[in-house]
Every structure is written in structure tokens, then in C-alpha cells.
Image: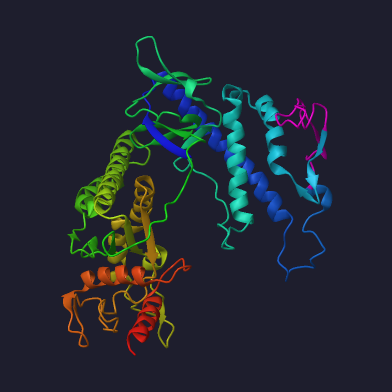
Amino acid sequence: MLLKYKYKLKPDKRQAVIISNWLEMARKQYNYRLAERLNWFEATRTPVNACPLNVSVVAVERIYQNIPEFRTQRRDGRKKDGNGNPVTKKGDKHPNIINGYVAWETVQLADLAQTKKLFPEYQSIHSQVLQDVIQRVQTTMDNFTKPDKNGKTSGKPKFKGKHYYNSFSYPQLSSSSIVKNANGRCCVSLPKIGLVPFVYNRSIPQGFKVKTGSVIREADGWYISFTIEDKTVPYEVVEIQPTLKNSKGIDLGLLYYAVTSDGEFIEVPKFLRFSEDRLSKLQARLSKKDKYSQSWKILRRKIAKLHQLIARQRLDWQFKLAYHLFSDVSVIFLEDLQIANLVRRCKAKLGDNGQFLPNGQSAKSGLNKSLHDAAFGQFVQVLEYVGWKLGKRIIKVDPKGTSQHCWECLNRVSKSLSERWHSCPRCGQELDRDYNSALLIQKIGLLSTQGEDITSHKTAVRVSLAEESRVVP
């Protein structure tokens, strides 16, 4: 099992300068290596309507220039065969170009020695920190060029500005890196930086060992995130059979943050909305300052810390709510919301003369801000983590029709967004719209057939009709 524990670093002035310089050099190295990859990627591809597929954009000699055909191994490999001998040995030659494709990760890792000769300041950085930069570039390019399990790829990688590259990693830290200095203060031993004090506010669980460590820059200082592992603890997702007593349905919304099937209404916290006035005043003052002046930097730091405070308030509240919701049940039914679709911009409307017509985007902008402030996507992730940690279960339900049908008889009762009361003419149910949705979500989950990953209203109707047909002679 892998977990991450995060702690606040307390470096002295010398250590803070070193960490800051390392981060800036790592950012420059990342941008340079990414430029190498993108230049080669663009040089070897062309639109099919521009020229024949068998003709390269540039000469083949230019594509592979400065790339050695082979690399020579400098030491024995770590992997051993059945007899204990290294699989790869010192002096072995490995190709850098395989079927026309450059093995960029190994080429760029080998080129780090040349980088240290040309730029001596890079000799001060730990070798594994620089190697991790190359691996980040490789991961970024893999996400861009290789589809995931759903057949989708990420967008073209972007170069990182100063405020968008905020961490560097030690891939091989260990539990022995956490020590106490002469004053008895807990410190982490970072190679080539020294003993850096940190706030050891929670101990690492017994049996877990530190595997990696990442130094992270945030608005209020430096942090370190440890990846810890215990191979004896399996990662398992419990399979609990939901019943009416051990489960509840939850409907998420903006009038009430969450409404449960047992009748609990939870108010929306609105952390961003309550701090919006203070944010607007600070940003108005910032706009009047000279850019990069001392007062401009001070105000900018205040704004960043306020945003950080809002994010932390929201996350803390969501964790407390997740534990509260799981306090009396073992299974929670939840809508499988597509947040990206909820905050998508309205489609443009064109008139006969080609001019843009009002499309309601101005009103939608306020709704989008409230959706981002509520952070439903983050809350679902928190709920899943808390459920896994407590050994409980979350089942997602297709959100289609959950607000337009009666929970008792499954009859369709159409309602606009402004209508907040559910009144069913068929069975006579009279209750709050969100409460009805929570009850319906629970019923859909309980009536779902086995083998379906996402249950839906149609599933519930089909199952309920099948049950009625068995009862009626």
C-alpha cells in the first residue's frame, strides 16, 4: 500500500536559497528537455493533406543529428538473473534509435553529464533530482502521445513559467532520512542541502517505509511530501451488499450542499463567496502598483495566501463532512456527476446578420463560480478516500432523471430548475425536490442489477416492473 504524508519544512536562510535555486534550475532543465522532445516530434510529422506520407518534413540527417546511435553501459545493472549475475553488464551497448524512434529518456539522461560540464551550477544539484526532471518530461510526453484506457490523450505539453513549476523530487529517500539534530529537533536529511527541520506533526505508521520525497513550494513556504509504502498491507476495496438500513443516498446541489435520504439538509459553506470582498479589494490595490515592485510582491503574496486559506478551509470542511456522512452507514449512493459538463460555457448564438445574440453566459458565469466554490469533484474524491479508509463503499448512480422522477412510483414529474418542490400526481408524494432526488438515488442503487458499474433510472424501472410482474398473478 502506498500513502502520502505532507509536512511543513522550516529551512534556514541558506537552505531556503539553495532550495529556491534548485527549483529554478530544475524548471529551466525541464523546459529545455521538453523543447528537445517537441522539436523532434514536430519535425517528424506532417498533415496528410500537406505532402505524401512517405516524405519527411526535414532531411533524415537533421532528424538524428547529435543523437548517438548507441550508448555504452558504464556499470553493471541492478537486475539479477536466477544465478545472481547482473542481467546487463558494464560495457554492453544499447541502441538509442529503435525502429526510427529515439529512446529520448535514456538519451537525455546520458546528456546530463554534458549539461554539468557546460553549466557548472548544475553540479550542485543532486543527480537523482535532475534525473527526476527527465522522467517528468517523459511522463508528460507519454500522456500527450499515448492514449489512456479510454482512448484519450492530454493536450500538448506547455513550458513551465516560474509560478507553474513548484516542486522537485528525491526518488530514493528512506526512513533513515528522518533524524534529529543536535538540539533534538526533527529534521529530514536532504542530500547536498543538509538537515532541514520540519514540523513532524504526525508520525509515520508502523511498518511503512519512506520511498520518495518531494520538496514543494506553496504560498506560505516550503513543504515536503513523503511517499510511504508497506507491502504487507494489501490495497483492497470492500464489497458490502447494500441494504435499506446500511445505506443512504446523497443529492449534491447549490441550494443545499448535500441532502441525504434520511432527511438531513447540509448548508453550502461558500468559502470563496465569503472571502470575495476581501479578495476584490486586494486585487484592486494590486492593479494600481508597479509590476514587480516591492509593494506589488507583498500584495501578491497576501492574495496567494488568502486563496490558500480558502482552499484549505474547503478541504478541511469536506473531510469532516465525509466522516459525518459515513458515521451511521456503510454504503453511500452518489450521482456520477460530470463536472466539466456542468461548468461548460454556453454555446454562441448567431443572428441572421451574423451578430452574436444573448446566450445566457453572463448568468451562467455566476453559476460556474458557485460550482467551482462548491468543488463537488474534490468532495467526491474525498468521500471515496474516506470510504476506502474506513472500509466502506461508494456506489455511483447515473444522474439522468434523478430530479425529474418520483422516488416512490418512478413516475416522471417534469420540473424546471426554479421549482423546488416535488408533487407527484400519481402517488401523491409531496416533499422537497432535493430530498426526493436523494431518496430516488438510494432506490436506484438498491434496485440495480448486478454486473452494472453505473446504475441508472432505466435500470430501476426495469427491475421494479419485473418485480411487479412476479407479484401480479
Q: Outermost residue, front direction? A: 473
Q: Is residue 231 above or below residue 454?
A: above
Taking the image as shown, residue 455 lies to the left or right of residue 130, namely left
Q: Position of residue 112 (x, y in %)?
A: 67, 31
Which residue is at a point 35% across and 50% down the rendered structure image?
387
Q: Is residue 29 or residue 432 the one in the foreground?
A: 432
Write down the region rendered in magenta.
64-92
Q: Is residue 419 magenta?
A: no
Residue 465 vertical position relative to residue 253 in the rendered view, above or below: below
Who is closer to the viewer here, 453 or 57?
Answer: 453
- Check the image and name the residue furthest to the bottom: 473
Nearer the observer, 154 or 78: 78
Percent x, y of residue 46: 72, 62
Give the answer, above or below, for where 266 lies relative to 172: below
Measured as percent of width and height from the top left, residue 380 is found at 36, 56
Q: Is residue 68 magenta?
A: yes
* Residue 193 visible, this angle: yes
Can residue 336 be seen here? The reply is: no
Residue 240 figure quarter: bottom left
Residue 258: percent from the left, percent from the top?
24, 61
Q: Quadrant of the C terminus?
A: bottom left
Q: Is residue 70 left or right of residue 179?
A: right
- In the image, is 151 to the left or to the right of 298? right
User: How many labels, in total?
Assistant: 0
Q: Nearer the viewer, residue 39 or 355?
A: 39
Q: Quadrant of residue 201?
A: top left
- Main SS category, magenta section: loop
Is the image coloured rainbow, by chain, by secondary structure, or in one colour?
rainbow
Residue at image position (38%, 9%) is 182
